[in-house]
Image (cartoon, rainbow, N blue to C red):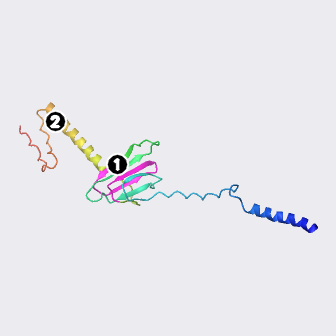
Amino acid sequence: MRSNLWAVPAAFAAFAAMAWAVPSPAGADPAPAPAPAPPAAPKTVIDHDGAFVVGTDIAPGVYASAGPVGNGTCSWRRIAAAPAGQTGDTIDRAFTHEAQVVQIDASDGTFKTTGCQTWQLTDQAPPGPGLPPVLQGLKLKAYLDTLNRNAAQYNAANPDAPAAPVSPPQGTGPAPGPAPTPTP
């Protein structure tokens, strides 16, 4: 009987070893979750219309576009960062028929583009300081209007002064020659 006594504990030990080696579904530890994929790097090419978050969707830097698609108009805006649910202020913008180069800063919130050919991160020099061409034209017109208004006021106050030349409306032909000099 001695041999039978040793046989039961050996069989039990083998069964216990198998029970520990094969986990049951109910008591098993869950398999580790796969590691999350690293976030995609921001793009350096903008090949379609839309609003792109700077630093997430696109990398900051100097971008260039050949201008509008077809005979359309290329429109872009740099928009300041703003709290969630709000739209930031416009930092800079253009609405043009010409090739464009724009500096998108890391502190910008969004870059929005419509109707432009592909934007590409470039090593071109960023655009110089100053106003966009549209605003430069408006500013020049305001200066000319002020000068003309001042000249008219001067002539009204000084009837003996020679008349200031009047510039024709744009596109109507060459400017008139100098005003005739009054003879005493």
* Residue at the limit of the structure toward the right, as seen here: 2
Q: Secondary structure at mark 1?
A: strand
**Farthest-out residue, left:** 184
* Picture layout, residue 21 above or below residue 49: below
Quadrant in which the N terminus appears: bottom right
* Picture residue at 40% right of the left edge, 53% below the top: 103
Q: Select label 1 or label 2 by which is in front.
A: 1
Left or right: where 123 falls relative to 18: left
Name the side, left or right, on which 4 lies relative to 160.
right
Q: Residue at x 16, y 48 (%)?
A: 170
The foreground one among 145 and 138 is: 138
Q: Which quadrant holds residue 180?
A: top left
Task: Give the magenta part as a residue range.
Answer: 92-117
Which residue occupies the foreground of this view, 95 or 37? 37
Residue 141: image quadrant is: top left
- Residue 19, magenta (yes or no): no
How far apart are the alpha carbons under marks 1 and 2? 36 Å
Q: Earlier in the sequence, mark 1 or mark 2?
A: 1
Mark 2 closeness class: few <14, some 14–19, many ≥20 residues within 10 Å:
some
Magenta: main secondary structure equals strand
Query: In the image, 184: left or right of 114?
Result: left
The residue nearer to you, when weighing 2 against 174, is 2
Callout 1, which amino acid? Arg
Which residue position is annotated with label 2?
A: 152
Residue 175: give x, y in percent of width and height. Answer: 13, 48
What is the number of the mark on residue 93? 1
Place of residue 69 in the rendered image (x, y in percent of width and height, measured from the top left):
30, 59
Give the residue type at disc 2: Ala
Q: Position of residue 179 (x, y in %)?
A: 10, 43
